[in-house]
């Protein structure tokens, strides 16, 4: 029985009182991450993010006005948020520079559906991720309250209660990916709904950057003082005044200089191309979140992927580092015998480093990239176990899977390199490259040792979006999406 069939069976059973043993009576809210909601411009009457089709993605990132609808207007920065409407969760694979691929939430929604008494128990909360997290948190608090109230009045709710040992009334479970975890935590602030925290059974976060991500600073700085591909410059232009992106800036001590490490300041953010006022607002927002505890918080965290942890700023340009400082229990940095700060490769999911995401008492670590942590089968299995209130046994012992490094943008017809880390042998490891517009167009790439690392060369014949999939001997799959554009176009400078 596939997941769609299971959903129909579960729904029918909920109306007759005959429920499978594993379903919960609780209401579930799915909260996507940044760029995880489809957006519609009500003024121009057109979608501005999340359309079906790979050709749309390429045009969006390379045509002069392809993504202008995402740029914040003066009215929006002043708090008037009526122009853009979120119409649903991302249903098609998407791509953006630096953040690489975004996988659709279809599998996550279907998986959650197999653990509830009726599809009506699941709310897909789409939101305008360009806006401040605090704005979306208020909307989520209202939507979650309405959802719980509605579900408690649903006939399947009573059937589900009778099915459970404690027969308690439904509570909320939030399943939140990336930025969605920040929105969820803020929504549980009692200023919005004094009872929402008490009505929440648990929160599951997937790759949430609770302490921020260096990649946000890199995006704001892209193309300043150095030539970069046109899509990367376009992303910076869109994000320069985007509050949501500023809310993802590192809030831990991440800036190296003069033998020490300190917090980024609003002045630092302005110097690299961001908005000082938005950076200041983001810092205040995060400071106010420290007192909000997440009930029965479980986090699924991507590991073993090379991930930026610290940064250096020189003459307005950012240099990101794949290692970072770590602190003792008293907050002082670990230093070597010469009293210099030691740096460690903690890794993460390629976007969020492990210690920024792993703040929950119960953490499940999986070797996944950021865009796949809400879709991969291993992550969905963990979510299912938590929803069904089973004891989760945690990750396998030892280093799982492998690290994957691939370019986010390549040229059709030219070779490019895929690099794997954390492998001792080539035996049992496979590498596939799949064209998302034609699943039959699949290449099995040859892996080889290259300067102490495992790598493979890949070439795609035509522009399009492709998925790199690495299967390791311990039965883990690590994936990343790569956009291929026409020859010469990725390196073309913006004329703006």
Image: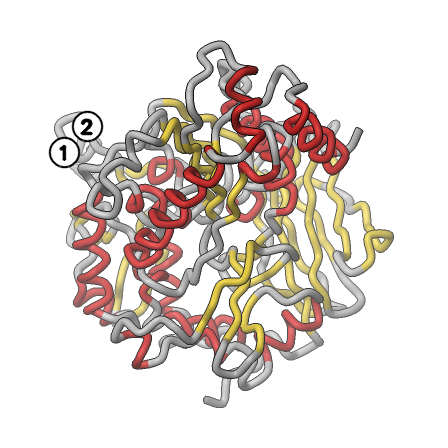
Tell me the residue at 60%/41% (across/down): 109
Decide: few, some or many residues near mark 2? Use Cα within 10 Å; few <14, some 14-19, many ≥20: few
Q: CA distance from mark 2 to mark 1?
A: 5 Å
Q: On the picture, is 290 further left or further right than 208?
A: left
Q: On the picture, is 184 further left or further right than 457?
A: left
Quick check: 373 above or below 313?
above
Q: Is residue 142 visible?
A: yes
Secondary structure beneath disc 2?
A: loop
The residue labelled by disc 2 is 328
Decide: few, some or many residues near mark 1? Use Cα within 10 Å; few <14, some 14-19, many ≥20: few
The residue labelled by disc 1 is 332
Q: On the picture, is 75 further left or further right than 363?
A: left
- The answer to which image quadrant residue 114 occupies is top right
- The answer to which image quadrant residue 196 occupies is top left
Q: Residue furthest top?
A: 165
Quick check: 233 above or below 383?
below
């Amino acid at each position: 029985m596939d997941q769609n069939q299971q959903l129909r069976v579960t729904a029918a059973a909920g109306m007759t009182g005959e429920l499978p043993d594993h379903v919960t009576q609780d209401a579930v809210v799915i909260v996507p991450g940044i760029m995880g909601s489809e957006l519609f411009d009500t003024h121009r009457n057109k979608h501005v993010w999340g359309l079906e089709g790979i050709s749309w993605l390429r045009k969006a990132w390379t045509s002069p006005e392809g993504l202008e609808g995402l740029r914040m207007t003066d009215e929006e920065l002043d708090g008037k948020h009526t122009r853009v409407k979120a119409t649903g969760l991302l249903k098609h694979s998407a791509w953006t520079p630096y953040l690489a691929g975004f996988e659709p939430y279809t599998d996550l929604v279907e998986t959650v559906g197999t653990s509830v008494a009726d599809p009506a128990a699941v709310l897909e909360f789409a939101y305008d991720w360009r806006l401040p997290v605090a704005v979306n948190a208020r909307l989520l608090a209202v939507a979650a309250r309405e959802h719980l109230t509605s579900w408690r009045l649903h006939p399947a709710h009573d059937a589900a209660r009778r099915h459970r040992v404690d027969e308690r009334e439904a509570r909320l479970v939030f399943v939140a990916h990336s930025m969605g975890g920040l929105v969820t935590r803020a929504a549980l602030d009692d200023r919005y709904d004094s009872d929402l925290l008490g009505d929440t059974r648990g929160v599951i976060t997937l790759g949430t950057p609770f302490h921020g991500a260096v990649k946000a600073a890199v995006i704001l700085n892209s193309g300043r003082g150095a030539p970069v591909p046109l899509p990367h410059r376009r992303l910076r232009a869109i994000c320069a005044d985007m509050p949501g992106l500023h809310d993802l800036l590192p809030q831990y001590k991440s800036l190296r200089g003069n033998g020490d490490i300190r917090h980024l300041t609003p002045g630092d953010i302005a110097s690299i191309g961001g908005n000082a006022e938005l950076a200041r607002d983001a810092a205040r927002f995060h400071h106010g979140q420290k007192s909000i505890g997440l009930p029965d918080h479980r986090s699924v965290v991507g590991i073993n992927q090379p991930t930026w942890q610290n940064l250096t700023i020189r003459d307005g340009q950012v240099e990101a580092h794949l290692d970072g400082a770590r602190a003792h229990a008293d907050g002082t940095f670990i230093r070597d015998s010469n009293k210099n700060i030691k740096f460690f490769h903690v890794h993460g999911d390629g976007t969020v480093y492990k210690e920024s995401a792993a703040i929950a008492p119960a953490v499940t670590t999986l070797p996944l990239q950021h865009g796949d942590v809400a879709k991969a089968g291993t992550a969905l299995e963990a979510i299912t176990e938590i929803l069904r209130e089973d004891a989760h046994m945690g990750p396998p012992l030892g280093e799982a899977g492998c690290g994957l490094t691939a370019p986010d943008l390549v040229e059709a017809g030219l070779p490019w390199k895929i690099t794997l880390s954390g492998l001792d042998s080539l035996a049992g490891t496979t590498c596939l490259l799949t064209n998302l517009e034609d699943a039959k167009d699949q290449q099995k790439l040859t892996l080889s040792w290259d300067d102490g690392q495992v790598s493979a060369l890949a070439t795609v014949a035509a522009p399009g979006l492709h998925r790199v999939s690495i299967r390791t001997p311990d039965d883990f799959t690590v994936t990343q999406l790569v956009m291929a554009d026409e020859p010469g176009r990725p390196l073309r400078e913006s004329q703006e």
